[in-house]
Amino acid sequence: METSHGLTRPDRKTIEKNRRIHMKALYSKLLSLLPTPSSQQEGGAVTLADRLNEAINYIKRMQEMLERMQKRKRQLTGSAGTASEVATASRSPKIDVQDLRSGLRVIVVISPCDHHLIFCEVVRVLGAEGVDIITASYAVVGDRAFHTIQFLAPKNGTGEADQLMGRLKKAIHA
């Protein structure tokens, strides 16, 4: 060790040893965050360069998957497209009637500004149809309101869900 104005400095050998220890710890941390490589599972020897290349490829795949998922999320929430397309899509309600063994379920997706009025209209139409509502709930997420109504409906034969969806759409869009 050299002295400079009364202070001791570590020699190059010690500095290099500490650097290698630090790099080894960082490398181990990186490996712990990655899935086990296929070459290691097969019992083959894996070099440092191979593991780093696998880490790079894994990160790139994860970035691509994240971008695809974000794009899919934008499509599902209706935020893809022009501002006028988004505004039109948020104003027109989407209705789905599902036929369950115990009855039917109506799912209405609408903009939150008028969701109470449309919910009341759906309940009014269901009441006119003579159904017994079992559960009704809603949630507002972003620029959408999701209403779910599960009910017992008188069995009128096949196509009941389609007929009910037609009546609901007609009442809501009127």
Image (cartoon, rainbow, N blue to C red):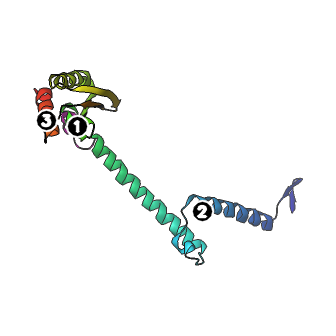
Residues at discs 2 and 3 in contact (Cβ within 8 Å): no
Q: Counting other residues with Cα less than 10 Å from the Cα at mark 3, is it few (<14), some (14-19), or many (20 or more)?
A: few
Residue type beneath disc 2? Leu
Regarding mark 1 in the picture, which secondary structure is present there? Answer: helix
> What stretch of residues is rendered in magenta?
78-88
Circle nearer the viewer, 2 or 3: 3
Residue at left 47%, top 65%? 57
Label disc, if present, on residue 86 of the rendered structure: 1
Mark 2 lies on residue: 31
Q: Position of residue 171 (x, y in %)?
A: 12, 27
Classify 159 as above or below 172: below
- Relative placement, left or right, of 113 versus 9 is left
Residue 33, given in percent of the width and then of the height, sits at 57, 58
Classify mark 1: residues with Cα within 10 Å, few (<14), some (14-19) or many (20+): some
From the viewer's side, name the closer residue of 94 and 83: 94
In the rendered image, which quarter is residue 145 located in?
top left
Q: Amino acid at mark 3?
A: Asn
Q: Earlier in the sequence, mark 1 or mark 3?
A: 1
Q: Which residue is mark 3?
A: 156
In the current view of this chain or complex, which residue is farthest to the bottom? 44
